[in-house]
Image (cartoon, rainbow, N blue to C red):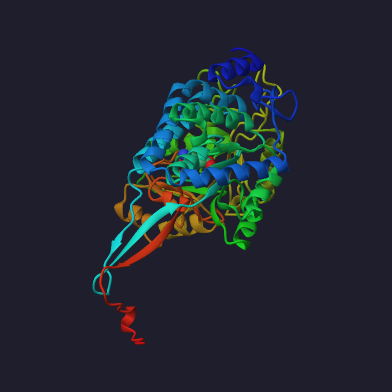
Amino acid sequence: MKPTPTLFTDTWAELGVDPAALPATGLAVHSPIDGTLLAHAPITTADAVDAANARAQAAFLRWREVPAPRRGELVRLLGEELRRHKAALGRLVSLEAGKIESEGLGEVQEMIDICDFAVGLSRQLHGLTIASERPEHRMMEQWHPLGAVAVITAFNFPVAVWAWNAALALVCGDPVLWKPSEKTPLTALAVQGLFERAARRFGPPAETDGLSQVLIGRADIGQRLAEDRRIALVSATGSTRMGRAVAPVVAARFGRLLLELGGNNAVIVAPSANLDLALRAIVFGAAGTAGQRCTTTRRLIVHESIQAALVERLTRAYASLPIGHPLAAGVLVGPLIDARSGAAMDAALAAARAEGGCILVGGEAVTVAGCEGGTYRRPALVEMPEQTPIVCEETFAPILYVLTYRDFAEAIALQNAVPQGLSSAVFTNDLREAEAFLGPSGSDCGIANVNLGTSGAEIGGAFGGEKDSGGGRESGSDAWKNYMRRATNTINRGLALPLAQGVRFDI
Ligand code: UN1
């Protein structure tokens, strides 16, 4: 393995992004792998945020008149750039966010997938035709471009979540202002570089000017965008705390919000479950991405009759999980994003112990040779006597709390008894249990799966959750409607003016 600074320089060169994008001073970005300083990112001043916003407004006036299939062509070209640079961008995700190689590549694949989806969608932004109650009248719906969209993303999916938003926003006719996490601005700059290359292939610069811009800095940038009436939609991904800060500001000006916040996702394992399947899904869901997905499995609710057998297998799997440099072959668990995350994990484990929990395996710091500046932890499996306060919290680290149930209704009640409602899963071969879990009195989450885990959703479905998870839906299905405004049009082709509801008003 090359040293981190060399890997970074090589990767940046491979991406072909303008080296001038990286100034000598600014926001210092350290790799979670070993703490190495990767580069500085340019910090966007408040004035520059306003200027970018003005540019986006001008872009909107042009872009909304471009036929949607032509807008799709820009996203198709972006998808091509992403395909061409998948390996390098995936590696950059690993260097900046600490993901293992396969997950870094998977993240770029998720971007490619949503680009493909959006290209198809660009010819399917359909409205309905509705029967009118009045003679010689016709009603219909049209979907129009909405306006500038602010996209606030988190470190753990530094590029895919932008793509979910940007690919749809662009085909829907909206420019995008992107505020990436201050921990991962370099991947954002690289993606912006790829976007600009796609834009150059698309047509003259004036056609695409201001359609995609990156604003780098801390929470004050998000705050400024949230306050600005010219931002039609604020799509924010991050903690529930962040959502509580942004939501009232946008709501106060009746702006549109799309929130994708924390999760506290559970897997229920019933007596009839295929334990081989359950084991793989649980370990990937709980320890994969070092427990740093919003869809990470944080609670296991297992039937008492199989608890011992499943926990024994999980303990063995956890004890042998390969932890290390995320780009080293065979490694499945990379670093946490920073030392603060490690401290939060330690604090949560201490709280769990104080609340009667027993750590079955993991939790300890792991020293990785050559990566001493990184924060590595063995994923922890913690048996809890009940769903105590710490279990109801989302700690963004690989901790899986194990709870036991006796009857299925109790399992569903436990699964739903947390503030968050993002993702959930049941492992069962009992049709009645599966259907109960998916039914109206079953899982209260935005995502509910049978015989697969809580994380790793495909882009084709709508992604998001209820309650403290924010209520937003991004990515597939009809999530595109967030990025457009609906107009209901009624047209009279007759010479009379009949009023609806039979109202008479003769003058
Ligand atoms: C997130 O963690 O913010 O379903 C998004 C998944 C991924 C997306 C996670 N496709 O785990």
What is the x, y in percent for residue 309? 45, 39
18 and 310: which one is in front?
18
Residue 463 as seen in the image, left or right of residue 150: left
What is the x, y in percent for residue 392? 59, 53
Q: Quadrant of residue 134?
A: bottom left
220 and 263: which one is in front?
220
Residue 407 as seen in the image, left or right of residue 177: left
The number of numbered badges drawn on the structure is: 0
8 and 253: which one is in front?
253
449 and 160: which one is in front?
160
Q: In the image as oriented, which residue stretches furthest toward the top?
A: 2
Which quadrant holds the C terminus? bottom left
Can residue 358 be seen from the camera position used here? Answer: no
Q: Residue at x 42, y 60 (%)?
A: 409
Q: In the image as oriented, which residue stretches furthest toward the right?
A: 25
Q: Residue at x 42, y 29 (%)?
A: 77
What is the x, y in percent for residue 475? 44, 44
Q: Is residue 247 above or below residue 7?
A: below
Q: Is residue 12 above or below residue 225?
A: above
Q: Quadrant of residue 34?
A: top right
What is the x, y in percent for residue 275? 39, 39
Q: Is residue 334 above or below residue 390?
A: above
